[in-house]
Image: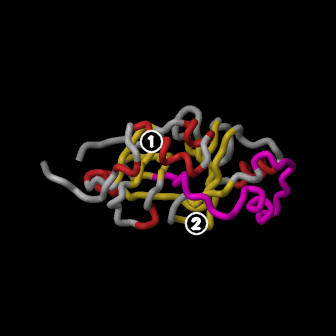
Amino acid sequence: MQSIDLTDHFLIAMPGLEDSFFTRTLTYICEHSERGALGLVVNRPTDLSVEKLLLQLGMSPKSTASSNLPVLLGGPVQIDSGFVLHEPVGSWKFTLSSNESIGLTSSADILQAVADCEGPERMLIALGYSGWVAGQLEQELAQNAWLTVPAESQILFELSSEERLPAAMKLLGIDFCNLSSEVGHA
């Protein structure tokens, strides 16, 4: 199978994808290598706000600017752990750079900075992540489980979670309503 790198791409779940967790999801791939892939679902908000999360962690937000943002359900792996997708990359502990401007941080120092109004300019906070072992994502792509398109930071950070999937589909010139899980033959 040909080697591909989908780092900094969106995965759009096709209607026929068998894993119900990913139904109608848009996933941002933070890293993709021969070892596997790691991403965050970016259109599945939870009932938890950033403010409530910070308070649960014993951090008092100094501002409500980003406090009302919903915390996302980033994937089915380690749902008790938090991940911050942010721009710019900055210099946080345990940061994985997806590109020159977007990073993924899993350390508490970034959350304390958010509480202190010293966090990144733009961010998404998620509980859990989506992961694939070596070759798994490539196999799913070969089975037409996903559409892929290069990611755009405006979709990640400027649109609401409900607007992200349709905006990513628009990058491909496709309306989600026109997708089918049925396979046809000409």
Query: For numbered disc 1, what is the local secondary structure?
Result: strand
Q: How far apart in space, not on screen, are marks 2 and 1 (Cα)?
A: 22 Å
Which contiguous range is marked in magenta?
A: 38-66
Residue count near mark 1 (Cα–Cα under 10 Å), binned few <14, some 14–19, many ≥20: many
The vertical placement of 97 against 131, above or below, is: above
Q: How many marks?
A: 2
Frontmost residue, 1 versus 17: 17
In this picture the colour scheme is secondary structure
Q: Position of residue 181 (x, y in %)?
A: 30, 59
* Residue on which the image places disc 2: 79
* Magenta stretch contains residue 150: no
Residue shown at the point (56%, 45%) measured from the top left: 96
The vertical placement of 73 against 176, above or below, is: below
Looking at the rendered structure, the kind of residue marked 1 is His
Residue shown at the point (35%, 51%) measured from the top left: 146
Among numbered discs 2 and 1, the one appearing first in the sequence = 1
Q: Position of residue 135 (x, y in %)?
A: 32, 54
Q: Position of residue 33 (x, y in %)?
A: 40, 46
- Does 31 sit left or right of 72 as displayed? left
* Residue on which the image places disc 1: 9
**Residue 142 visible in the shown view:** yes
Query: For numbered disc 2, what is the local secondary structure?
Result: strand
Q: Quadrant of residue 145?
A: bottom left
Mark drawn on residue 95: none
